[in-house]
Image (cartoon, rainbow, N blue to C red):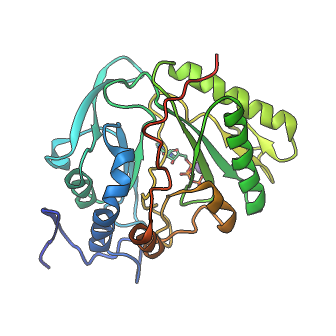
Amino acid sequence: MQPLIVDGIAISHPDREVFGQGGPTKGDVATYYEAVAPLMLPELRGRPLSVVRCPRGTSGACFFQKHHADALGKHVKAVSLKEKDGADAQYLYVDDVEGLLELVQMNALEFHPWGARVDNPDQPDRLIFDIDPAKGVDWKTVVACARDIRERLQANGLESFVRASGGKGLHVVAPLRRGPSWEAVKAFCEGMADAMVADAPTRYIAEASKARREGLIFIDWLRNTRGATSVAGWSLRARPGAPVAMPLRWEEIARLKTGGAFDVKRALKRAASLEADPWEGIASLEQTLPT
Ligand code: ATP
Ligand code: MN
């Protein structure tokens, strides 16, 4: 089998069914990312990136990779960042469709950027609440939780944006003017999550422990730490059915049934027919955390 050339990048084994029999092939994954790259790259460019690679498809072992390697391709960039233990390490990021496709060639399926940029990894430029419903929590409650977060952020002077995770839940993201530390942003998010639990303890939980989550929504504020990631809009998920994480307009969330409502086909249709980026304006908002 000849490699498939997509935007000048050679994709080997394009007929390999990476999501199982009858599902999207590696070639489909490459042409998918080529099609959505203009919508996706604004969220990837200049941010340290972790990728989920599945060399044997989603039925084999998949792993998160955050470190750079020359073998990833010549458009995949490196940035030297401090690890937790103080040592320097090379992290990876991409700025263009060629870099994105070189990672696809290396069997990357999912793309997870930091909430900070390579030129200043210690100052986040966005905060995130990851809404994780336990099994059995209905979608209406998930939607209400996202709206509640949006309103509380608004009350603090912060506009926010919402994405379907491609899995069970929703993510609410607010852009920030850089300045406050990760600690400050995390403390703000923890305070908000705690207030939500205090107001609705039968619906929400803000503790990472899995034990008491049954029937509740875990409002995960812990993603707001240096090195934490969240999945980028338009990223595939390495899960059955090839779902896609999707940036949405706030009005759209009520019409979904799950965070995994978009698959490749539906995402491509949406990309082709979108009149405006659902997250339009996120890059130009200059918002500050309340003190
Ligand atoms: P769902 O809606 O199903 O929860 P999700 O993308 O929010 O989907 P989570 O398990 O809640 O999935 O994880 C939140 C984020 O944490 C992910 O988007 C990912 O960026 C990051 N993450 C999850 N697992 C790992 C891991 N093993 N290594 C590094 N980052 C991870
Ligand atoms: Mn989640």
How far across and down, in percent of the image, does residue 63 sit?
39, 51
22 versus 253 height, above or below: below
Q: Which residue extends farthest front?
A: 275
- Tell me the quarter of the picture where residue 36 sits: bottom left
* Residue 195 in the figure: left or right of residue 44: right
How many numbered dots are placed on residues in this image? 0
Query: Can residue 65 be spotted in the picture?
Result: no
- Quarter holding the N terminus is bottom left
Residue drawn at the location 52% of the way across and 68% of the way down = 262
* Foreground of the two, 19 or 223: 223
Task: Identify the residue at horizontal 39%, vertical 71% (top origin).
Answer: 272
Residue placed most toward the observer, 209 or 251? 251
Figure quadrant of residue 136: bottom right
On screen, 63 above or below 268? above
Q: In the displayed structure, would residue 126 be above or below residue 20?
A: above
Q: Nearer the viewer, residue 56 or 160?
A: 160
Q: Quadrant of the C terminus?
A: top right
Relative side of 264 to 128, left or right: left
Q: Position of residue 26 (x, y in %)?
A: 29, 70
